[in-house]
Image (cartoon, helix red, strand yellow):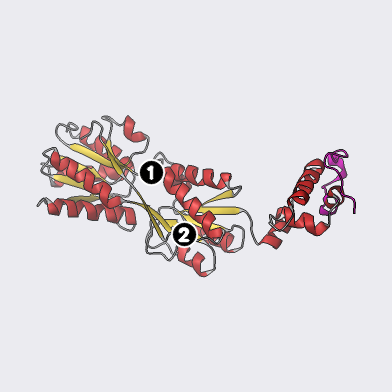
Amino acid sequence: MRRAVAGQGTARSPRQGRPTLEEVAERAGVSRATVSRVVNGQTTVAEDLRRAVEAAAAELGYVPHAAARSLVTHRTDSVALILPESPNRVFSDDQFFPSVIRGVAGELDAAGKLLVLLTTGSAEARSRAERYAVGGHVDGVMFASLHDADLLPELMLRRGVPVVCNGLPHLSAPCIDVDHESGVEAAVRYLLAQGRRRIATVAGPQDMVAGRTRLDAYRQTLAEADRRAIIAVGDFTAESGHAGMRQLLADEPEIDAVFVASDLMAHGALQALREAGRRVPEDVAVVGFDDIALASYCDPPLTTVRQPIAEIGRSMARTMLRLLDGLEVEPLTILPTELVVRESA
């Protein structure tokens, strides 16, 4: 069969309807099966035939039908990111989730994949996410900032859905996390080096790896310095940081430093200290954790432990892409943290 020369003919008018696979084959001078293999990304097609098919498809304005292609490839070219919080919490001013989303979206977009964002802050939302993911609408699922009691990741794994997670390393799926221990140790040792003697903490939620691990590291570092732990517990919100700081001041008026397990909680703690007439850092030094944009604009600017939030998202997406390609992945990836010294300590 004579192969058509790329560039011959005119583009199809939109009024003529959607171009078909057969029309692309006729224009390119190849079989329908060859066009199908090219469209579905198979590598068994000779380069000259591939170029002819791609040129013919471009001339005709042919776009593969996603549903039909997924039947052949068993791929949707979309990946879900499930965030176990309400939409209000996800898009609040804590900036953690938006930064993770930005990191995931950039990697998936570069790989030609679609990001599907799902929030599961209620039982109904979790049920909808479960039905959507196990129903074959996505190729894999990523979870960020998990709580211990969240059974959805394990359920997805049992249903054969590829899973990558952040914040639950005991799960039988690849996990991306940060070096909480080293970051907290650096923060507490810095406060000790400044001559602070009564160092308290507002810890994060104890049903999350980040909250639990940061509290453990705070306790361990103080124990090694023969100092007593002074603890309040929050939930990573500014309101809980404010309440935790008020509790600490009521229980231990002589505290002269506080490590706060998130920057948003530290923002609330700073407000509570101002209300109590305590100067920062003269009376009480404050160190946070995250280094979100808010940290630079606190009054005073917040000394904090920087974690690479957007890189968490990028690493999750890269791991998922490797998983979907059948490549080996690391079961646990730990990203570094570092202390950023500003004016609050």
Residues drawn in magenta? 1-24
List x then y, in percent, for residue 289: 30, 43
Kind of residue sitting beneath label 1: Pro
List x then y, in percent, for residue 243: 26, 44
Report the side of 68 relative to 260 (left or right): right
Between tags 1 and 2, which lies in front?
A: 2
Relative to 200, say whether 281 is above or below: above
Q: In this rendered view, identify the residue nearer to me: 103 or 243.
A: 103
Labels 1 and 2: the sequence-earlier one? 1
**Residue carrying label 1:** 308
* Residue at screen point 68% across, 56% down: 43
Tag shown at residue 218? none
Q: Is residue 45 magenta?
A: no
Q: Is residue 4 magenta?
A: yes
* Residue at screen point 62% across, 53% down: 77
Rate crowding at label 1 as few (under 14), some (14 to 19) or many (20 or more) other CA atoms within 10 Å. Answer: many
Image quarter of the N terminus: bottom right
List x then y, in percent, for residue 38: 73, 54
Q: Looking at the image, can residue 276 be seen?
A: yes
Q: Secondary structure at mark 2?
A: loop
Determine the CA span between mark 1 and mark 2.
20 Å
Kind of residue sitting beneath label 2: Val
* Residue at screen point 30% across, 51% down: 180
**Residue carrying label 2:** 329
Circles 1, 2 touching at the beta carbon (< 8 Å)? no
Relative to 321, say whether 239 is above or below: above
Please identify the dominant SS of the magenta region.
loop
Relative to 50, say whether 323 is above or below: below
List x then y, in percent, for residue 125: 51, 56
Report the side of 249 relative to 143 (left or right): left
User: How many labels, in total?
Assistant: 2
Q: Secondary structure at mark 1?
A: loop
